[in-house]
Amino acid sequence: MTIKKILVSLLLFTSICRADNPIILWDIHGVLLQTQDRALTFFTFPHLKEVFSHFSWPLLKDFASLSAQHLFQDTSSEEYIKTALKHGNPHLAELIISIANAQRPIPGMKELVQELHALGVEQHIGSNIGETSFRRLLDSNKHPYVAPFFKRMDLKKSIVTGFENGEIIKKPDARFFEKYLAHNAIELDKTPVLFIDDNWDNVRVARSMGFDAILFKNPQQLRKELRARNIPIKAPHQIYSTQRDAHKLHPPFSFYRVIPAANQ
């Protein structure tokens, strides 16, 4: 076979992979990343004194209101950051960003993202992380364990939480998904998108709009779900067990432990 034929075959193979595989739209927190060292981040923050010296009663009231909302729905760090800046407390805004970004990759997810990239699968972010926190998370100097994750993603086609006309647009609001589709001129009947999230409400709304959607519990379960959709990734070599497995609709925990597989 000539070099020209080999190159043509490779191009055809790549195009087939891209045509057969859906775009994957990733949530971040609880799917790609898990929280780590938040208490340490708080107590080692260099401007903690300035944070408390600029607290005010109106700021406390607004924070209490946001916290009350968080009991019933996801609250983005962007809302807290905006509130802190509104009340003249930039050091508090920086502390919020630092705590929100105290994250580490979930074991096994980095390899999965790399495999999908090698297969030619297009990957986007669709997260309630705020724009400010996300931009900071992409800094490889400040977040060397996390930033490389997103090199496999098409960030220009991704979407994170932000304000529009003074209103926050975030999951599970259908407008979040509509904004993503409009931004990329995607028609789901022509271009399938697989949405992966650990929050049932987000998954439910995405499915109602025509997305294929997976409720994430752990990397092993996700690999099985992807293979069931004919995405040719490797079978898992380890079984990831999590307390969240017992909570199929509203999994509250992010703790992982690795158990060797008995039979693979």
Image (spheres, rainbow, N blue to C red):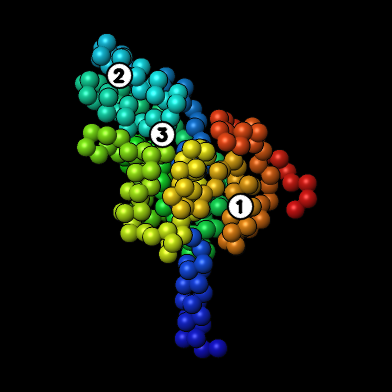
Q: CA distance from mark 2 to mark 3?
A: 22 Å
Query: Residue flagged by tag 2: what amino acid is it?
Result: Asp
Question: Can you say which quadrant of the picture contains the N terminus?
Answer: bottom right
- Indicate which disc, 1 or 3, sits on the residue closer to the N terminus: 3
* Residue bearing the label numbered 1: 225
Q: Position of residue 103 (x, y in %)?
A: 47, 35
Badge 2 density bin: few <14, some 14–19, many ≥20, Cα 10 Å = some
Mark 2 or 3: the one toward you: 2
Mark 1 or 3: the one toward you: 1
Residue at left offset 58%, top offset 55%: 226
Residue 145 seen from this side: no
Q: CA distance from mark 1 to mark 2?
A: 41 Å
Q: Position of residue 80 (x, y in %)?
A: 32, 26
> Is 187 located above or below residue 45 in the figure?
below
Residue at left offset 46%, top offset 53%: 210
Q: Are marks 2 and 3 in contact (CB under 8 Å)?
A: no
